[in-house]
Image (tube, grey):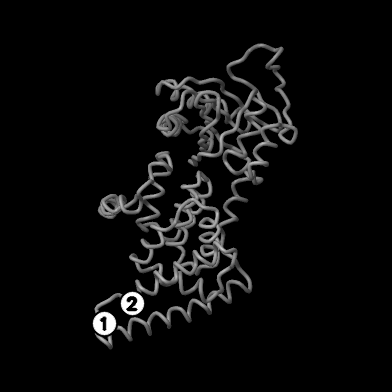
Amino acid sequence: MNSTERPRLAVRSPGDLAAAVPYLLGFHPADSVVVVAVRGRRVVFAARGDLPEPGADPRPAARHLAEVVARQGTDAATVIGYGPAARVTAAVDAVGEALDRTGLLVLDALRVTDGRWWSYLCAEPVCCPPEGTPYDPAASEVSAAAVFAGQVALPDRAALAAQVSPLGGPVRVAMRRATARAHRRLAGLTGEAAGTGLTSDPVRSSGVAAVRTAFRRHRRGERLGDDEVAWLTVLLTHLPVRDHAWSRTDGRDADISLWTDVLRRSEPELIAAPGSLLAFAAWRAGHGAVAAVALERVLATHPGYSLAVLLDDALRRGLSPAELDGWPATAGPVLRRRKRRPRR
């Protein structure tokens, strides 16, 4: 399940809402059920889940989706199913019933397929014909407003996941060599410190410097070199360095861009920290879908990484990015609890 808060869009019809959803999510949904929540007359939140497999009970997933939406402090919601009627209808009905039980007003329940929408709550053929109502996202004022605001709607979720996928070819070869050099550099640093009996932590000091350089250079529009990225990813395996980077990461575009670049160039065994930092930055910016695909990549190879587990749990529960204020300082006790309770 993906949830996100995006810049507010005003809609005036089911067609406008259908046109807005891809920009609310960041991609065009397929085989999905989406809940679009409003506060007053403005769309302020959207949450998406996969349609249940044929024959599966849709109610457990529907209850979870409704609970996520209910936490957002919204007034009402519209449920939209994307896909064939045979799969959509039961899912939309289950979500609508679950929303009713939370006390949220269900404004409409729609199915969207192949450029047409149908309403489950309207039986008037004049406004809701049985053959569906066509809509043109390209001609919608909502789409124009979203594009003007800098929002993007990728073709599908796979295209979103591709934005955080590893870079291959010559980049991967260069990064493999740079990472080997970074490991040798780290071994020399720790060996030198041990030999001199230093009481300070040279790894943390080097990490703080590397993080500071990375942020400064990226915010100036400069791209880090291979050795800089490799050195940063090796240092980020040291938790004090990771936490220092976390404390300086926010929802700025430059932060999202930095950690996306570092994640895509990292060697597979080193993606946990940059992927989690990207997820945190994306979530702070309201890009819940980007956070979700970043966490999926991290947890696929590092299922027990505490920061990724913590963020994944919070994202699935639909916590507002505003509730992250004060992190990571306030997250220490939560991280320790999560370490004692392994993710199943």
Using residue 336 as the reference point, say whether residue 72 is left or right of it.
right
Residue 112: image location, x then y, percent = 64, 30
Residue 30: image location, x then y, percent = 61, 39
| Looking at the image, residue 180 lies above or below residue 261 | below
- Report the Cα–Cα distance between label 2 and label 1: 8 Å
Viewer-proximal residue, 103 or 49? 103
Q: Which residue, given by chain and number where applicable, does mark 2 sit on?
A: 202
The amino acid sitting under disc 1 is Leu
> Label 1 near label 2: C-beta < 8 Å?
yes
Residue 60 tag number: none
Q: Would you call the spot at circle 1 few (<14 residues within 10 Å), some (14-19), or many (20 or more)?
A: few
Residue 119: image location, x then y, percent = 62, 20
Using residue 70 as the reference point, say whether residue 18 is left or right of it.
right
- Say what secondary structure mark 2 lies in: helix
Q: Would you call the spot at circle 2 few (<14 residues within 10 Å), some (14-19), or many (20 or more)?
A: some
Q: Which residue, given by chain and number where applicable, does mark 1 sit on?
A: 198
Residue 254: image location, x then y, percent = 54, 57
Residue at 59%, 67% (x, y): give it: 222
| Looking at the image, residue 49 lies above or below residue 167 | above
- Say what secondary structure mark 1 lies in: loop
| Looking at the image, residue 309 lies above or below residue 96 | below
The amino acid sitting under disc 2 is Pro
Residue at 39%, 79% (x, y): give it: 186
Viewer-proximal residue, 322 or 98? 322
Using residue 210 as the reference point, say whether residue 15 is left or right of it.
right
Residue at 24%, 78% (x, y): give it: 199
